Amino acid sequence: MNAAALRKACLAMTGAEETFPFGPENSVFKVSGKVFAISRLDREPPLRISLKCEPGLAEQLRVSHAAITPGYHLNKRHWNTVVLDGSVPAEEVWELVDHSYDLVVAKLTRAERARL
């Protein structure tokens, strides 16, 4: 999985935007101003992506995959960092991106969801 594919997948989400509040090297993907993914896309492989996750699932994923750890510099209960070294299947990574996006959208107001 490369940086271009990761960026494309995140930006394919309805209403998603890429911002750089932590400097030009850190891509922060948001929907309605709320973060659902963070990645340093210019770094040498393997890439890493931090994603929001339901707490119970987050813990299960960490047990199941050595490449999934508590979110780096994030709330460890609600965020995971996934090392994209190939050990987590690409399809599962895309599902985790979807899950993160869905969690954020679910917390938006009804009006914000309607605008999407």
Image (cartoon, rainbow, N blue to C red):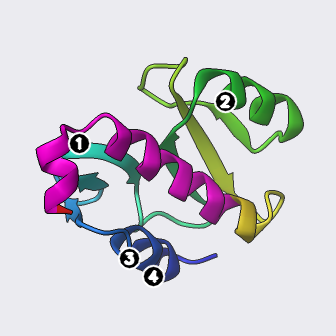
> Which quarter of the rendering shows the N terminus?
bottom right
Mark 2 neighbour density, 10 Å: few (under 14) some (14–19) many (20 or more): many
Q: Where is 12 relative to 62, above or below?
A: below
Q: State yes or no: residue 96 in magenta.
A: yes
- The type of residue carrying mark 2 is Ala
Q: Where is 66 relative to 86, above or below?
A: above
Provide residue 81's location: percent of width, then percent of height. Answer: 58, 40
Would you say the residues marked 2 and 1 are in contact, meaning their CB atoms lie under 8 Å apart? no
Q: 116 or 79: nearer the eye?
A: 116
How far apart are the two marked residues, 2 and 1, measured between alpha carbons? 19 Å
Circle nearer the viewer, 1 or 4: 1
**Mark 2 lies on residue:** 58
The structure residue drawn at horizontal position 11% and vertical position 46%, both measured from the top left corner, is 111
Residue 103 found in image quarter: top left
The chief SS type of the magenta part is helix
Would you say the residues marked 3 and 1 are in contact, meaning their CB atoms lie under 8 Å apart? no
- What number of labels is visible? 4
**Mark 4 lies on residue:** 4
For label 1, the SS is strand
For label 2, the SS is helix
The structure residue drawn at horizontal position 21% and vertical position 65%, both measured from the top left corner, is 17
* The magenta segment: 93-115
- The type of residue carrying mark 3 is Ala
Going from N to C along the chain, the mark reached first, 4 or 3, is 4
Q: 73 or 18: nearer the eye?
A: 18
Circle nearer the viewer, 2 or 4: 2
**Mark 3 lies on residue:** 12
- The type of residue carrying mark 4 is Ala
How far apart are the two marked residues, 4 and 3, measured between alpha carbons? 12 Å
**Mark 1 lies on residue:** 34
Residue 63 found in image quarter: top right
